Amino acid sequence: MRLTYTSDVWWKNAVVYCLDVETFKDGNGDGVGDFRGLTQQIDYLAGLGVTCLWLMPFFPTPNKDDGYDITDFYSIDPRLGTLGDFVEFMRTAHDRGLRVIADLVVNHTSDQHPWFKESRSSKNSPLRDWYVWSDKPEPDDPSKVVFPDKEDSLWEWDNRSKQYYLHSFYKHQPDLNVANPEVRDEITRVLGFWMELGLSGFRVDAVPFLIENVDPKLPDPHEFLQDMRAFMTRRKGGSILLGEVNVPYPELVKYFGDGLGDQVTMCFDFISMQKAWLSLARQDAGPLADALRERPKPPKDGQWAMFLRNHDELTLDKLTDEERQEVFDAFGPEKDMQIFGRGLRRRLPTMLGGDLRHVKMAYSLLFSLPGTPVIFYGEEIGMGENLAEEGRLAVRVPMQWTPDGGFSQADPVREMPEGSFAPDRVNVADQKRDTASLLRWFQLLIERYRECPELAWGTYTVLDAGHHAVFAHRCDADGASVVVVHNLCDTAVDAELKLPGLEGHQLTDLLVDGTLDVSDDATVKLPLGPHGCRWLRASPPQIAPEDAGVMSQ
Ligand code: NOJ
């Protein structure tokens, strides 16, 4: 593998930063974040080292699902700015070397979208078939209701046109019918429009719902994903689809396009994310190790997108009831912290009790896991949630820039947390000046992750570390090896690794000073402090220790 591949196949070891324009930075003093504010912060993002921004929906919306209910796919929510502001932002981002992707929310529209208004106007509407209608839908499977706090069915009766319409999510989000070729064409037009304005791809919302919940069923639902990807590649090679596909691994590989890799470029790894939380709760590496051992290999040029938290609830839907309860007990015991019976509406640092050492270890783990890390704004400074905000909005609080907030000069669109996670305790300005801060730790992790493409590109092996609390893995590519070790428990432990092929090598610590020697029988002993973590680059005895990538040019 050549280092130059990492620019062509840029997503494979990108660092993706998800943000909502609405809550990132207010540039015009009205309390709502906007593109002008975001553009002012581009140098902050570039300085952090992230390589790709993922913008949550920024389109006109009644905002009943925080923008995931769109009324116009071709323009900007006026509260966030204008198309002109968007283009200025894109230009500035590109100038700083940042790529930008955006949410593609085309499983559904808002019920206020002109298409739906037209569709529901009569059974004979030319857009009737753009949505999924039924005289007598199949009885609901309650387990398929995504938001059980607000909905009890996937179908809603439309009194005017006397049929039911399908809504996989809220009833104000009618499902588009991609079985209709006109709808597929329109979606392609949306992709083309934003790519023309500079986007490098899309985070595709709710992919399984998009291709499955249609009428009539598509003979091969995956063909639509292939068509989308092919279209994007024709228009702009190297543009990507990052899929929200929360299904078990065996089903998931189909979304990459089986062996071909011609559908979704990257899929979020919901399984190892959930198992990682179980491992953290148990202080036992087992669940995460098992998940990564079972995980299928993505097709060539495909990649897993790794995350610990995102803008939604921490979903634990793929754990057993008992396992989920363990995570609830450890990280969200109060009812108000739980949501939908399956998740937690909390951010990571509060779940880990604000213990900086623990938080730093968790993110070190994230950046070292094989795949492309995706972080949610504010994670880099350890922001907490505000449970006073409704539902999932608890984790979507305004970015904390300075001790007095710094998000807006007006009252912010959402309330910031109080107490130990309030802006005077957690903010960018202070952490920039503090070399021991989480922000500085993120900068280091990102720098090291980028210098170790083996982590994302290499072949990984989960190692037995001789202690149940230690998660250890090695990544090898082109004869270069990186070995990573994490202690999930809060006491010091000794790990012992077997590193076949690295007999007599030296391991250079990439996070702190120090080296270790691998014995001639390929063993290395590693003392780890409570929640200790080490990233180690191996170098052969005759070559001076390296602490940066050693791939060919
Ligand atoms: C998944 C998004 O992540 C979530 O925030 C949204 O509510 C649903 N899809 C519906 O668009």
Image: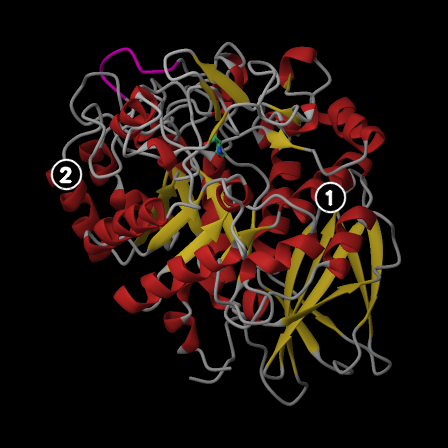
Query: What residue range appears in magenta?
Result: 408-414
Outermost residue toward the bottom in this view: 542
In the picture shown, does residue 291 fall above or below 407? below
- Residue marked by disc 2: 83
Q: In this view, does 390 lie to the left or right of 199?
A: right
Residue 546, compared with residue 490, is above or below; it is below
Q: Can residue 369 be seen in this view?
A: no
Q: In this view, does 159 lie to the left or right of 283?
A: left
Instruction: Give the camera-side residue of 400 and 438.
Output: 400
Residue 257 or residue 509, whichever sits in front: 257
Q: Quadrant of residue 530?
A: top right
Q: Tell me how far mark 1 sits from mark 2, CA to CA.
A: 41 Å
Q: Quadrant of residue 294?
A: bottom right
Q: Can residue 222 be seen in this view?
A: yes
State the image coordinates of residue 285 (x, y, percent, origin top left). 80, 48
Q: Residue at (49%, 40%) from the top-left corner? A: 215
Instruction: Point out which mark residue 275 bears.
Output: 1
Type of amino acid under label 1? Lys
Indicate yes or no whether the magenta region holds residue 411. Answer: yes
Local secondary structure at mark 1 = helix
Residue farthest to the front, as pictured: 124
Image: 137 above or below 151: below
Q: Where is residue 138 in the image (x, y as percent from the top left)?
A: 63, 27
Q: Please give the name of the residue rendered at 30% of the width and 68% of the height, measured from the top-left corner.
A: 234
Q: Does the magenta stretch include residue 537?
A: no
At which x and y percent is residue 494? 84, 54
**Which residue sits at x=72%, y=63%?**
473
State whether residue 511 is above or below residue 394.
Answer: below
Q: In this view, does 325 lie to the left or right of 35?
A: right
Mark 2 neighbour class, 10 Å CA radius: few under 14, some 14 to 19, many 20 or more: some
